[in-house]
Image (cartoon, grey):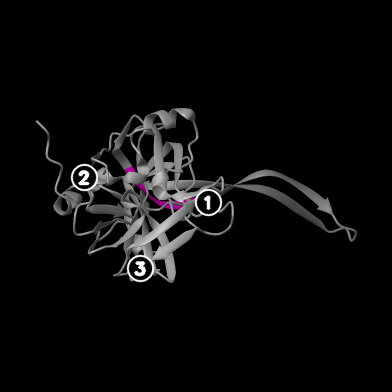
Amino acid sequence: MEVCSSGALGPVRVRLRNARGEVGDATAGHFLVAREAAWQILRDVQPTHATAIVIGGSPDNVEFLGTAFALRRGQFFLTALHCVGSRESIGLLLPAQESRVFPVKVIHRHPSADLAVLDLGRDFEAVTPFWTAVDNLGLGEEFFAFGYPEDALEGRGAPVPRLFVGNFQRFFDHRDSLSGRGYPASEMSIPAPRGLSGGPVFRPGAPVVLTGMVTANFDSTTALEAHEEEDQDGRKRTLQYQRVISYGVALRLASFGDWLDDLIPPRESRS
């Protein structure tokens, strides 16, 4: 990853490396897909033009905190509150704006859910925001999730734009045991690696329609096999082989429509 800065949170130009080792601006749209159909749907709807990387720290010590995405206009971005934490000074790296970082003017924190609205103070016309969020979801329904998780393949921890394809496995009321925050949630069939938090979850057939936002990841273990063995002293022990299964969690945004409407004026209908 290359970072070229010109002072305080911006403008900063960042070049990202994808999983194939190719280097380019985030606007190049280097994201991974699970099937060829995704390329057809996303050919004219680039998730990189609707999303951003949440940035903390300083130009000399950049922190990649998570993903954010624009809702209704290119001024307001949503992210998971835990990506922001108690910070008062953060920025957004906008691939749609030549991968420059712009300071967030106002951070609106939801009082009880893992949700925050980041206000840049002005509209960026190059950003193509998501339009709305819906809650008419079904078990097994397919979704896309997009974000900038860490590049675990090469071990450098730099964010890599990736598109995930999965299905909703269940719907439940999630409560974080550490923060105490709770919200209606969807369990996803994909993992949510570090950096994907705050990423949009949306419908493949309607990319401008949100179904949620990535917030958490859970690991579960399942026993594959077990056998008993005896050492030379006659002591027995049982060996068990387990497999770790990861599930991502998405906050259901439509449940917070009133709160979002107060902060982000709804889009005007076109006649």
Q: Earlier in the sequence, mark 1 or mark 3?
A: 3
Asked if the stretch drawn in magenta spans residue 231, the answer is no
User: What residue type is disc 2 on?
Assistant: Arg
Secondary structure under badge 2? Answer: loop
User: Which of the 4 image quarters holds residue 50?
Assistant: top left
Q: Earlier in the sequence, mark 3 or mark 2?
A: 3
Q: Is residue 1 above or below residue 142?
A: below
Give the camera-side residue of 269 and 223. 269
Q: Which label number is shown at residue 72?
A: 2
Mark 1 residue crowding within 10 angstroms, few (<14) / some (14–19) / many (20+): few
Cβ atoms under marks 1 and 2 closer than 8 Å: no
Please tell me whether mark 1 or mark 3 is closer to you in this view: 3
Whole-number angstrom distance, CA of label 1 to CA of label 3:
41 Å
Q: Position of residue 174 (x, y in %)?
A: 37, 51
Q: Residue furthest right?
A: 232
**From which residue to which does the magenta span run?**
212-219
- Residue at 12 percent across and 33 percent down: it is 270
Whether residue 172 appears in this view of the structure is: no
Instruction: Identify the residue position indicated by label 1 in the image.
Output: 219
Q: Earlier in the sequence, mark 1 or mark 2?
A: 2
Instruction: Identify the residue position indicated by label 3 in the image.
Output: 6
Please tell me whether mark 1 or mark 2 is closer to you in this view: 2
Please tell me whether mark 3 or mark 2 is closer to you in this view: 3
Mark 3 residue crowding within 10 angstroms, few (<14) / some (14–19) / many (20+): few
